[in-house]
Amino acid sequence: MSGATRRVVIVGDSIAGCTAARELRALGHDGPITMVGCDPDGCYARPPLSKRVLAEGVGASDAWDLSDLDLTAVTALATGVDVERRVIRLAEGDDVPYDALIVATGAAARRLAAPDQSGELVVRSLADARLLRERLENATSAIVVGAGFLGMEVASACAARDIPVTVVDVDPPLQRILGPFLSDAIAARAAARSVDVRRVDRPVELVGDPVGGVRIDGIESTADLVVSCVGEVPGTHWLDGSGLGDAGGVDIDDRCATAVSGVFAAGDVTRGSDESGRVRRTPFWSNAIAQGRVAAASALDLPARCTATDDYFWTEVLGLSIKVVGPLPLVGAPTVLEGSVEDGSALLEWTHADGRRTVVAYGMKKAVGLLRRMVS
């Protein structure tokens, strides 16, 4: 099938989907592109939502302008896919036929509230961030459930406004990914800024309707804000019965191809095998970009211009920027190349058992390109 007639459909107006659309045109595809998405705020980058948007407002969000790509945008919810007929079913409107399909439906926030319990706050969409920022204006106390990247970023937004905040998790801050060395440093920084980090033995329960607190070991704690930052659920519900994915995600290979011919996937909806053969999800912004580009190339039967993995991510915790390049998780103590962790400015290096390296700029201004060169 020629490029002029190949119909490429992207389901999901995520950063992976938007990247795939732009890469299709960059690779010379002049055929029809249809993007099916249901976010009323359109296409935007999600990393700023828990950082700049909470601090500066909705104007700080990074909108994606796709008007130059000559694509057909369909604002609708995809409810299914017929892989034999190669059509996407929509909640409203006609079926959308495709020759190549890119699944980029991302993930939704995992929730703790009971089905009939209202008022749970999460941060996944621009609407979520908008609501939380409005609530921050008048809050005098906050509880954040989850001490991962998102949870610590939300806690940072509270601390920046002098809102007393308690972070609750079964593990220390960021330990599951960054390891005990950096987790201890972040915990010390949190304590110095009056952020109360509480370890629990079991998941907490949200209480109230609307939600107004948590129950920990039978004891209730209340706050003006209760924010759940407990991970995400891959957006695979519309793929039931297609053989493309399950509740854990859509499996892809290094070409972002799925088990079904003509269907590719990218971004937070995916899972793949790492170098050791473990199947896992890597829901980082950099991977969504890389996979979007690779999926676009594969949909056109062209060689990709990058690999489907990009071991880079960054976060901001209590005014401290942390940039990481290299495989995760981190185990043991690093080599300190520059500076001092105690002073909040250090360049750190971990060497893994397989010889690969990870470099972390902990509060130190270093260009990402330099960090990439250090581990290449």
Image (spheres, helix red, strand yellow):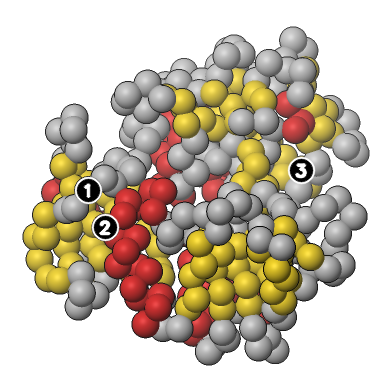
**Quadrant housing residue 165:** bottom right
Q: Residues within 10 Å of mark 3 (few under 14, many from 20)?
A: some
Name the amino acid type tagged 2: Phe
Name the amino acid type tagged 1: Gly
What secondary structure is found at the residue carrying circle 1? loop
- Decide which of 338, 142 is in the foreground and name it: 142
Name the amino acid type tagged 3: Val
Q: Is residue 118 visible?
A: yes
Q: Which residue is mark 2?
A: 181
Mark sitting earlier along the chain (1/2): 2
Residue 74 tag number: 3
Point out residue 84 in the picture as x, y percentages from the top left corner.
74, 10
**Which quarter of the rendered picture does the N terminus lie within?**
top right
The reply to whether discs 1 and 2 touch (Cβ–Cβ < 8 Å) is yes
Residue at left offset 67%, top offset 25%:
246
Residue at left offset 56%, top offset 74%:
166
Q: Residues within 10 Å of mark 2 (few under 14, many from 20)?
A: some
Mark sitting earlier along the chain (2/3): 3
Distance, label 3 to label 1, CA atoms, is 49 Å
Residue at left offset 83%, top offset 68%:
208
